[in-house]
Image (cartoon, rainbow, N blue to C red):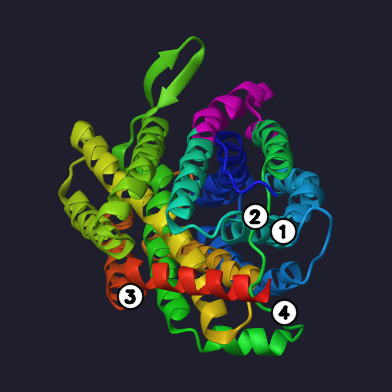
Amino acid sequence: MDNQITLKEKIGYGFGDMASSMFWKLFGMYLLFFYTDVMGITAAAAGTMFLVTRIWDTLFDPVVGAMADRTSSRWGKFRPYLLYMAIPFGVIGVLTFTTPAYSASGKLIYAYITYSAMMMIYSLINVPYASLLGVITPDGRERNTLASFRMAFAFGGSLLAVALIEPLVSIFSENENPQRGWQLGVAVIALICVQLFLLCFAWVKERVRPAFVQSASLKDDLRDLWQNRPWWILLGAGVAALIFNSIRDGATLYYFKYFIQQDAAFQLGNTKVTYSTLYLLIGQGANILGVVLASPVGNRIGKKNTYLLAMVIASVGSIAFYWLQKEQLVLIYVFQLIISVCAGIVFPLLWSMYADIADYSEWRNGRRATGLIFSSSSMSQKFGWTLGGALTGWLLGYFGFQANSMQEHATQQGIVLMLSWLPATGSLLSILFIILYPLSENRTALISKELAVRKQQLN
């Protein structure tokens, strides 16, 4: 098989996370708001639902990873999942944003069922997709580049979702029916996601083969993972970073609706662009800029140092956000840009480090468990959003939030804390974890060379 990573393949790989991220952004920024202000579920009940459903789903990710490791087909181990799960992904996504004509308790049960199904389908397509990074190429620098393509397209997908969803909801909300607007608006995005997954399947190749005969024992693979110190450290750093992002994202619409209390920023034809949409668009554009910077800066000063620098700046900026007043919109947008650039730098580095950990595990244990290793990245992502999403709902309830009504001053200040000090605790915790991360560029290069020698000896 041709070992050259073409531009088409890099773009195709990026399409996969573009599809995932369009829905993930809807979940992170809009789903809690949809549940409270459209479907009519209380914030505290929605927060508890996020925790309960995502705990099971988080534990499901390693199962998918182990299953993918043991998959054998003419398309490889991981690509078949992109083909077979693309359409279910889109269908369940639309059902998640559908409001049934049920009682309050019936709606909550419906939310539990559809959101649980959505997260399981997400695992079945996203864990194998993430694992592809470990088998497209063994080269560390190419992995940095692929991870940057992935995250650039991911944030591009998030940008597209944010740009489309509110105008689509407005267009489809006939007779002031936001429930119909959300269902049909999400359906448009779902069609885009299905096509992107299919293109990713068609354009990407699997090249890396194990240096050793694969163990059929899941028990051995799980024991190796349990004893993998770099994996535990990166898992903690990823969870903390995602708590940082999920609280900020989940509180954004509440911040602008109930604290800033301003609506349209400007008109584009018959469509109004709200201040919250503009804020989110700036954030997604800045994320893309951060992704572009991640590979050259990471290759120059190292992944670990780049991660630390970005998270320190994000922490300081987030804390400073607390003192911004509602009239200081320009500064609010400036701080959003700075923090989002740093967040954009962090995530491609995390994915690239997981690929390094897969090599480290094979070098140390004599077995390659790429899917299981990368399932932990999806697991950390979901667990971080689990805690962040649950905390967002619980905090809103704690601060006395009541949907679609004027909020007390204490509630408004609580929402401000959810954009500043509270997410900063997650970023500071992530810094503490990554300080302990032991795999330097020199060490990973030596591991890669030794694995290459072992493969030659086997051949």
Residue at label 3? 433
Q: Residue at x 49, y 9 (%)?
A: 269
Q: Residue at x 45, y 73 (%)?
A: 447
Residue 206 lies left or right of residue 239; in this view the side is right
Q: Which residues are magenta?
A: 160-181
- Give yes or no for contact between labels 3 and 4 (Cβ–Cβ under 8 Å): no
Q: Tell me the distance, in whole angstroms, between the alpha carbons under discs 4 and 1.
A: 18 Å
Residue 412 or residue 371, whichever sits in front = 371
Residue at label 1? 78
Q: Amino acid at mark 3?
A: Phe
- Mark 1 lies on a secondary structure that is loop
Residue 258 or residue 274, whichever sits in front = 274
Residue 2 appears in the picture as rendered: yes
Query: Crowding near pointer 2: few (<14 within 10 Å), some, many (20+)?
Result: many
The numbered dot on residue 213 is 4
- Mark 3 lies on a secondary structure that is helix
Residue 448 lies left or right of residue 195; in this view the side is left
- Give yes or no for contact between labels 2 and 1 (Cβ–Cβ under 8 Å): yes
Q: Amino acid at mark 1?
A: Phe
Q: Tell me the distance, in whole angstroms, between the alpha carbons under discs 3 and 2.
A: 26 Å
Residue at label 2? 129
Q: Earlier in the sequence, mark 3 or mark 2?
A: 2
- Magenta region, main secondary structure: helix
Q: Tell me the distance, in whole angstroms, between the alpha carbons under discs 2 and 1.
A: 7 Å
Residue 102 appears in the picture as rendered: no
Q: Residue at x 60, y 34 (%)?
A: 8
- Mark 2 lies on a secondary structure that is helix
Q: Tell me the distance, in whole angstroms, between the alpha carbons under discs 1 and 3.
A: 30 Å
Q: Position of residue 171 (x, y in %)?
A: 62, 21
Q: Residue at x 72, y 44 (%)?
A: 201
Q: Tell me the distance, in whole angstroms, between the alpha carbons under discs 3 and 4.
A: 33 Å
Q: Amino acid at mark 4?
A: Val
